[in-house]
Image: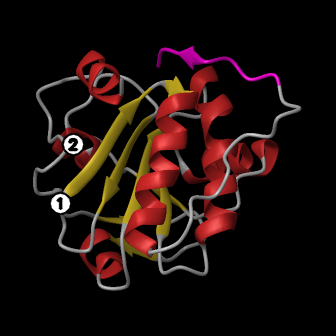
Amino acid sequence: MFERLLRRHKTAGPDAGSKAPDFSLATVEGGRFTLSESLGKGPAVIAFFKVSCPVCQLTLPFLDRLYQAYRGDSVTIQAVSQDNAEKSRLFAERFGVTFPVAIDGEGFPASKSYVFSQVPTIFLIDREGRIRFRSSGFSKAELVHLSAEIASLASRPPAPVFRASERVPEMRPG
């Protein structure tokens, strides 16, 4: 099932097993995020998004649940916004996103190096810099699979992404 979902999102960019392009971007908080430095601490989840994207507004709060669950396990969860710092900061506040947000500057160099056509697009990159997982749009099954992949890299049981009481759509294209 996951292979079918992944094929549905296939583009010309790097995919599972490929070397992840390195990048370094300013963060909303005024710091800097560099992928290669982050991977020195452990695996990284990179979520590319746009503030105006309704599917991003749906997806990133669920990624924040994974951030809360795995933050003590040397796993980085990093958003990369295609908007300016102020709009991105307001997005994070409005949608309860507490994980760090970097700004993909003029010309979107990081986004272009990952070659995707829709947001959100999420990558899980292992410590060796290989893409382990790629997903575009919103899919409950893919977010559950992402949690399982993170847990496998962190050598722990997977954290739940969704609550039984929640009404969440199965999928939404980006």
Label 1 residue SS:
loop
Determine the residue positioned at 50% across, 62% down.
77
Report the number of numbered marks. 2
Residue at the spot of label 2: 114
Spot occupied by residue 92 in the image (x, y as percentages of width and height): 70, 50
Q: Which residues are magenta?
A: 167-174
Residue 38 quadrant: bottom left
Main SS class of the magenta portion in the image: loop
Spot occupied by residue 82 in the image (x, y as percentages of width and height): 44, 40
Label 2 residue SS:
helix
Question: Which one is in front, 142 or 83?
Answer: 142
Instruction: State the scheme by which the image is colored.
Output: secondary structure
Q: Is residue 81 visible?
A: no
Q: Residues within 10 Å of mark 2 (few under 14, many from 20)?
A: some
Residue 130 is labelled as 1
Q: As displayed, is residue 109 above or below residue 112?
A: below
Question: Which one is in front, 117 or 157?
Answer: 157
Residue 42 quadrant: bottom left
How far apart are the alpha carbons under marks 2 and 1? Answer: 13 Å
Spot occupied by residue 16 in the image (x, y as percentages of width and height): 19, 45
Residue 161 is labelled as none
Determine the residue positioned at 36% across, 64% down.
25
Residue 29 vs residue 125: left or right?
Answer: right
- Disc 2 marks a residue whose amino acid type is Tyr
Determine the residue positioned at 67% across, 46% down.
161
Q: As displayed, is residue 34 above or below residue 63?
A: below
Please report contact status of discs 2 and 1: CB closer than 8 Å, yes or no.
no
Q: As displayed, is residue 28 above or below residue 172?
A: below
Residue 1 vs residue 54: left or right?
Answer: left
- Toward the bottom, the furthest residue is 41
- Disc 1 marks a residue whose amino acid type is Arg
Q: Residues within 10 Å of mark 1 (few under 14, many from 20)?
A: some
